[in-house]
Image (cartoon, rainbow, N blue to C red):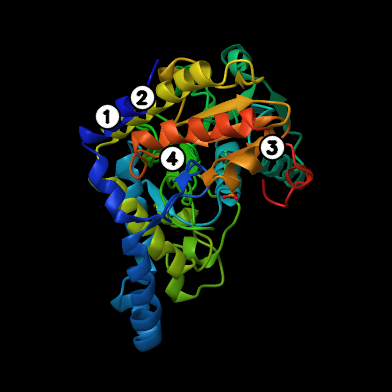
Amino acid sequence: MLTRSDFEKLDATDDLASFREEFLLPEGVVYLDGNSLGALPKASASRAEQVVRREWGQDLIKSWNKAGWVSLSERIGDKIAALIGAAPGEVVACDATGINLYKALGMALSLRPERKKILVEGSNFPTDLYVTQGLVQQLDRGHEIVYAEHEEILDAITEEVAVVSLIHVHYKTGRLLDMKAITEKAHAVGALVIWDLCHSAGAVPVDLNGCRADFAVGCGYKYLNGGPGAPGFIFVARRHQGQAIQPLTGWFGHEAPFEFHRDYRPAKTIRQMLTGTQPIVSLSLLEEGVDILGRADMNKIRRKSSLMGDLFVQLVEEQLDGFGFELASPRAAEKRGSQVSLRHEQGYAIMQALIAENIIGDFRAPDIVRFGFTPLYLRYVDIWDAVAGLRRVMEQKLWDLPDYQAKAAVT
Ligand SMILES: *Cc1c(COP(=O)(O)O)cnc(C)c1O
């Protein structure tokens, strides 16, 4: 049986431990929801002050040049590229993930005009599905969405498929797909692949170019710690740049935006994926989050988060036997991202009671409670304390209060 002192010992030799100092975390809170909203880097608070008071307040419009606002999306894109196995000039930071997916999918489909099938997982994050359904409707060119789950994906990739669009780490279960095998299979039949890295970027090592990925999108506010509503990012492999245009053709994607031409001429670079003016304050905060990750070793992050996941699962088995939990994530660390999910029919109320104990995870309908592991600011003892809290909630039936049954707008 594990004890709390096993966890204290792991913390004492943890070579990522010092990163916790770079975040502002509330006293006494165990935060296991960095997969939904990353914690606040200390540097972001001072950067916000600088961007708002000096760059905006004092320098006003001069900051577009002087502070480099005009190329901030590309500068941060290059930094994110280093985290996901892409090259400089292949990533820009901008827009919400859904919008970036719309652009990537539109571009990918126009690279395969003769093919009509788009392969997705039906259990994918809803916005990815909605955006795909919306684009198909807008294009009105007879595209068909084919739904396949996990083990069915490889066989469903046929010569009729134009684009395969998948989440690398599943948002509910944490299951990790084999990016290399799926991309290879798609290319073997002439299809293109879009990878959604929302739960991968900053959480697991990703090697887009090593896998010859075509397109990717991802989130800035989860493991990149960019802040609420932070812009996401989009990756287009160099070989596809300048080959087709994306559907949201705004002035920032024009070859020469400040010549104000009547007619659209796409930039031949990653800048073509931009549409309009980006939220500079949010982008600036994203840069601080990305910079912290840039200084951390992604393999160490992976090792720590895998061990945290394994220990969490072991503790759940040792401490919560008989309380009705079922593991919803893969048992093997190499098959999961940086989270562990449990199923329980009272999942929502249990999570509410746990949050009242200052242990924060989240709930995904119908019955999943999620626990995200963010090695940069979590300690091993947090894992012990989280499961101890969960045991208290179950033993004392703390979840069984009417207040905890009523669902809030955000779960
Ligand atoms: C978090 C998440 C999103 C978020 O989409 P936005 O458009 O940025 O709100 C999309 N897809 C997946 C898989 C996610 O996990």
Most extreme residue toward the front, as rendered? 396
Query: What is the three-letter code of the residue carrying label 4?
Result: His
Q: Is residue 282 above or below residue 114?
A: below
Element at label 3: loop
From the image, tell me which residue sits under label 4: 240
From the image, tell me which residue sits under label 1: 10
Q: CA distance from mark 2 to mark 1?
A: 10 Å
From the image, tell me which residue sits under label 2: 307
- Where residue 362 appears, as percent x and y from the top left, is 60, 41
Quick one: 62 or 49, which is closer to the camera? 49
Asked if the residue at tag 1 contacts the one at tag 2, i.e. Cβ–Cβ closer than 8 Å, the answer is yes
Q: CA distance from mark 2 to mark 4?
A: 38 Å
Neighbor class of circle 1 (other Cα within 10 Å; few <14, some 14-19, many 20+) is some
Is the CB atom of the residue marked by disc 1 within 8 angstroms of ligand 1's nearest atom? no
Query: What is the three-letter code of the residue carrying label 2?
Result: Leu
From the image, tell me which residue sits under label 3: 399
Q: Earlier in the sequence, mark 1 or mark 3?
A: 1
Q: Earlier in the sequence, mark 1 or mark 4?
A: 1
Query: What is the three-letter code of the residue carrying label 3?
Result: Trp
Point out the quarter of the image occupied by ligand 1: top right
